[in-house]
Amino acid sequence: MTRSLDALGRALGYRFNNAELLEAAVTHRSAGSRNNERLEFLGDAVLGYVIAEWLFEHFPDAPEGQLSRLRATLVKRESLASIARELQLGDYLRLGSGELKSGGFRRDSILSDAFEAILGAMVLDSDSGLDASRACIYRFFADRMAQLSAVDELKDPKTLLQEYLQSHKLELPAYDVLEVTGKAHDQYFVVECRVGGIPEPARGEGRSRRRAEQCAAQAMLAQLENTV
Amino acid sequence: MTRSLDALGRALGYRFNNAELLEAAVTHRSAGSRNNERLEFLGDAVLGYVIAEWLFEHFPDAPEGQLSRLRATLVKRESLASIARELQLGDYLRLGSGELKSGGFRRDSILSDAFEAILGAMVLDSDSGLDASRACIYRFFADRMAQLSAVDELKDPKTLLQEYLQSHKLELPAYDVLEVTGKAHDQYFVVECRVGGIPEPARGEGRSRRRAEQCAAQAMLAQLENTV
């Protein structure tokens, strides 16, 4: 037995005029044809836009590549699923019997889709366009938004490069030491970073292999962000 | 010498309060640091949302997979570049000398990015949020939107499957005849459709090999759209 949707409305801080929209938003396709797939399509676009708008405003000096990375961090499936868990969305899901038995109410994909579908349903339900969804997004993303800046700046270039390549479905990088000069305790490294499918390797130099690799990763990242 | 931006404002049907925003939107990164990369990030999200909202409303019976395909068709780079050409956007671009010499004002990627950047600039410039961008999108996509329904319905399942696989970066399908029964002029075909990386093949049957393949493609498409 799933919980009544009134409690979900309270958790969302939004009272639906049309309760059927909220009902559809928490209905997985396994439970019938009036399900949340179309609403999720809409909600995904709402979320993408609202987050882009917020990042644009709050990171006035961030280049496009950083804005894209920050958005990917915010809207990734695990983040949405974790917000859905804060809302106890699993308790409200309408699932078919197969999904119910296999624990679909705990699955990241089902939870995150339902959260996006709720954002889509709000846009349709509200008289004020995006405002209700935007308010809901700000409320549930507040902590994550506040942590963003710090997190992204703490990440080293190799990690950022790897995330960039994964998000663009590119191969992971290979690092090769081209040159080591100097004596044992005063060495200097030249490293090359290559990415499959990218013709130009990038170079980095430094007093340790790690420093040289980070420097090469930074150069590769800059190159990729300027050639897309 | 590039054309004055007043004429571009007229072509867009929108008068910018802050002319610097439009100036930035047509400035490629090769021309300086006040360029259109951040605006393009915002405009891409605006376009994605406005098109999703429109499709949701105008295709009330389309499943999510079809909405995604229709959106991909509308917002693909070549479509945006062709709208940019209707606006003669190439004449207004601010490019660095290298891009100028190599004909950057004709390049699809530069044109489509600038068009998206203009949509982002409108959202920032306008007092009414998305409305100005939405009106501009409706105006420039009107013909393409009108043709959408017809085009998608005319496409056969093999074409739709191929487009789906390409847009999801999956391997192209292989079709194999499993069984042919009946006499020369009354044959019946059973065909299997396989896609690399997808464990379950799909089957189709029909009175011609082509019909059986179309049927198998349809089944594979349905399977893929239900397992993402």
Image (cartoon, coloured by chain):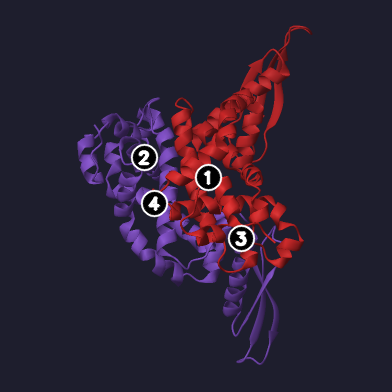
Chain colours: A purple, B red
Give the structural element (helix, strand or loop) at label 3.
loop
Residue B172 pos. (x, y %): 68, 37
Q: Say whether mark 4 and mark 1 are on the same chain.
A: yes
Residue A70 pos. (x, y %): 46, 60
Q: Say whether mark 3 and mark 1 are on the same chain.
A: no
Q: Residue A172, which numbered label?
A: 3
Kind of residue sitting beneath label 2: Ala
Q: Quadrant of the C terminus of chain A?
A: bottom right
Report the chain holding disc 1. B
Compared to residue B197, the image places residue B31 above or below, namely below
Q: How far apart are marks 2 and 4 (CA)?
A: 32 Å
Disc 2 target residue: A114
Q: Nearer the viewer, residue A202 or B14?
A: B14
Q: Say whether mark 4 and mark 3 are on the same chain.
A: no
Give the structural element (helix, strand or loop) at label 1.
loop
Left or right: A73 as drawn, with respect to A90: right
Q: Say whether mark 2 and mark 1 are on the same chain.
A: no
Report the chain holding disc 2. A
Q: Residue B127, which numbered label?
A: 4
Kind of residue sitting beneath label 3: Leu
Q: Distance between the residues labelled 1 and 3?
A: 45 Å
Q: Say whether mark 3 and mark 2 are on the same chain.
A: yes
Q: Distance between the residues labelled 2 and 3?
A: 32 Å
Residue A29 pos. (x, y %): 41, 30
Q: Residue B13, which numbered label?
A: 1
Kind of residue sitting beneath label 4: Asp
Question: Which residue is painted at 67% across and 53% down in the image?
Answer: B90
Callouts 1 and 4 close, C-beta under 8 Å? no
Left or right: A8 as drawn, with respect to A103: left
Does residue B158 show up?
yes
Q: Which of A135 and B209 is in front in this view?
A: A135
